[in-house]
Every structure is written in C-alpha cells, then in structure tokens.
Image (spheres, rainbow, N blue to C red):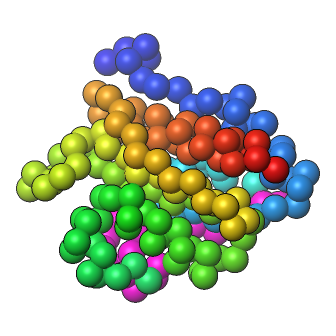
Amino acid sequence: MNGKDMAEIDFDKLNEIAEQIQKQGWKLALAESMTAGFLSSVWSLQTEAGTYLKGAVTAFDEEVKQHVLGVSPDLINLYTAESIEVTLAMLTGLRQLFPSDIQIAITGLAYEGKEKHPTAQVGDVFLAVALHEECTSRQYHFEGHNAAAIYIQAFNASLYLLDEQLGTI
C-alpha cells in the first residue's frame, strides 16, 4: 500500500480549532468506541493540549459503555452499539463524567468482526459533537483499505462537525 491510499489528518483544521478552544479557555472531552482512543491520541499531540483536553473514555466494550458512560443495555439491544442513538447516549454519559465545554462521541464499524453486524457496514461512523448544550450528530460512510484509513476520515469528520458547531457562536 502506498501513501496515496491513506487518508491524511487535516492538521490545518485541527490547529485552527485547537487554537480557538485554547483562546476561549474551553475544555474538551471524548468518548470513543470504534476508534479506541485514536481521536484523543491525536488531540493530545497538540502542543497546548494540556490546557484544554480534560479527559477521554475508550468504551470499546459494551460493558464500558454501560457501566462507565451509563448507556442503557436496552438502548444497545434496540439499536446496536454502532448507532447514532448509542453515540448520543455516550455523549450524555461523557458530560456527566467529565463536565466540559465540548464533547465528542464516536461509534462505528471500521472492520468486520467475527459475526456480520446486523445493520452497520464497514465504514459506517456515528458522530456526536456538543458545544455547551448544543449537540449535532451525524452518520457517515467512509471507504478505506483498512481501519486506519477509516479512523483518519472519522477524525477529520469530527473536526468538521465541531467546526460547524463553533461557527454558530
């Protein structure tokens, strides 16, 4: 696989948003399922991340979603763990766990598991972003040769969704 097959992180957008968050004195928290800490890891690489990155939860397992983020098992059973409904519930739990100005939650399917998912396809990503009390959520479908390509596209989508929220202030 050559470098042209891999998506690239939009560092210009990341730097722009990070600077705005820092100037406002806001705090950022993340709840990740599919990306297993990738989003928070990229955010943490920013020079001033320590001034605004409050915390993150990697909720790869359904029990973590339930016991740490307070996602109802009934909600997971009804919609599956890879759904916009569960992503929004993760965001709500994140707000309780890490009171912050900005929250980002993500679920999805970056690769096929042992059993075929009943509704989601590989590349389906569910994002929820909140700025203060205003929340926006969206479903995406990304193509990629591997999970890393889908993670990077999902990271960029989270930046653009947050940028939309920031444009409303």
- Report if residue 66 lies within the magenta region: yes
Percent from the top left, x then y, of residue 5? 38, 18
Left-right relation of 116 to 132: left
Q: Is residue 66 above or below residue 145?
A: below
Q: Give whichever of 161, 100 is nearer the camera.
A: 161
Q: Give whichever of 93, 115 is nearer the camera.
A: 93
Left-right relation of 35 to 166: left
Identity of the residue drawn at 33% across and 58% down: 83
Percent from the top left, x then y, of residue 37? 49, 57
Q: Is residue 24 above or below residue 96?
A: above
- Magenta span of residues: 51-69
Identity of the residue drawn at 54% across and 50% down: 39
Whether residue 13 appears in this view of the structure is yes
Identity of the residue drawn at 39% across and 58% down: 84
Percent from the top left, x then y, of residue 25? 88, 61
For the N terminus, give its image quadrant.
Answer: top left
Identity of the residue drawn at 73% across and 65% down: 132
Left-right relation of 158 to 146: right
Q: Residue furthest left?
A: 115
- Report if residue 65 lies within the magenta region: yes
Left-right relation of 114 to 150: left
